[in-house]
Structure formats: C-alpha cells, structure tokens
Amino acid sequence: MERALLILKPDAVQRGLIGAIISRFEQRGLKFQGLKLMQVDEALARRHYAEHEGKSFFNGLVSYITSAPVVVAVVAGKPGTVELVRAMVGATNPAKAAPGTIRGDFGVDIGRNLIHASDSPESGERETAIFFQPHELIGEWNRSLDGWI
Ligand code: RTP
Ligand code: MG
C-alpha cells in the first residue's frame, strides 16, 4: 500500500475547483482514505514544508498556504500510486505543466499552483501523519475494485 497526501491549496478552493480536482482522482480509480476542509496555521505549514526552509520562496509559500482554507486528502493504492498522482498533478510551474495535468489545465502561476502532492511514498507517510489523526483515515471500503485498480 502506498499513500499520497494531497492539499487543494487556497486558490483551488477560492476558485471553486474542489470538485473538478477531486473528480480527476476518482475518475482515475484512486481511492480516498481521508478528506477534509481545514485552515492551515503557520506552525503546520512550516512543518509540512520544512524541506524548503531557507529558500527564497519559503515565506511566501507559508503565507499562501495559510491564507485561506484548504482541502487535504489522502489517496491510497498499490505501489506506484505516488508517482501516478504526481504525474496527474504536473510540473511545479503551471506555465510549464503539460495540458491534461491539473496544474497544466487550471493554472499559470508558480505561486498559485493549486495543489500539493507528496513526492515519494516516504513523504506520503510523513505528511499523512502531520495532517490526519489515525481515526480520520478510512482503511477498508470499496474493496470490490481492488483486483484491478
Ligand atoms: P508541492 O510540494 O506543493 O506539491 O509542489 P512541488 O513538489 O511540485 O514543488 P516543490 O519544489 O516541493 O515546491 C513547493 C511549493 O513551493 C512553491 N514554489 N515556488 N517561486 C518559486 O520558485 C517556487 N518554487 C516552488 C510552489 O507552490 C510549490 O508547489
Ligand atoms: Mg514538493
């Protein structure tokens, strides 16, 4: 089992794109273990993006992610799920993201790139534990699809 944390960033929520973005993962056949609307505070933002501390864009990134509510979600699936999710999200800079990806279809600005996705299975586990309590994650449902998705 592999998990990716998704954050539909403030611009995605403000622009009314929650459904459109979530739909893409559902349509692809991926399964959600967790899903909620929340406000990220500064401490949580700094912890989540700790790897970027000290970079030129760090303070702006923390301001952006804490500026308005976000939707956080955990997608779980077989090995390769994280790579698949990243491919669906597209390049960090939406202006360079391929059409057909979420960033490539909905955005143009690296400072407003709509969505976060974990970049490795290890990040997926770390980030899931930051954003979700164990009881918020639903492990066993819709198993009839397990054989082929
Ligand atoms: P994310 O972590 O949000 O999924 O994005 P990513 O892996 O594609 O990109 P990453 O390198 O981890 O950067 C994290 C977020 O920081 C902002 N950023 N701004 N102005 C810049 O040069 C710059 N570079 C990165 C973006 O919001 C990016 O998603
Ligand atoms: Mg990243």
Image: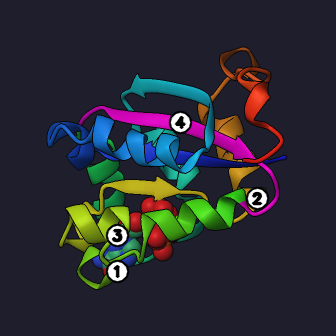
**Residue 106, image x, y percentages:** 22, 61
Could you give the CA–CA distance between mark 1 and mark 3, rounded to whole angstroms? 6 Å
Front residue of this view, candidates 37 and 104: 104
According to the picture, the residue beneath numbered tag 1 turns out to be 98
Circles 3 and 4 in contact, beta carbons < 8 Å: no
Where disc 3 sits, the SS reads loop
According to the picture, the residue beneath numbered tag 2 turns out to be 121
Residue at the image position 59 percent from the left and 44 percent from the top: 29
Colouring of the image: rainbow
**Residue 55, image x, y percentages:** 44, 77
Region of the chain picked out in magenta, as a range: 68-80
Where disc 1 sits, the SS reads loop
Could you give the CA–CA distance between mark 3 and mark 4, rounded to whole angstroms? 21 Å
Front residue of this view, candidates 94 and 148: 148
* Mark 1 Cβ inside 8 Å of ligand 1: no
| Front position among marks 4 and 1 | 1
According to the picture, the residue beneath numbered tag 3 turns out to be 100
Q: Is residue 56 visible?
A: no
Q: Is residue 115 magenta?
A: no
| Front position among marks 3 and 4 | 3
Front residue of this view, candidates 146 and 117: 146
Residue at the image position 71 percent from the left and 23 percent from the top: 142
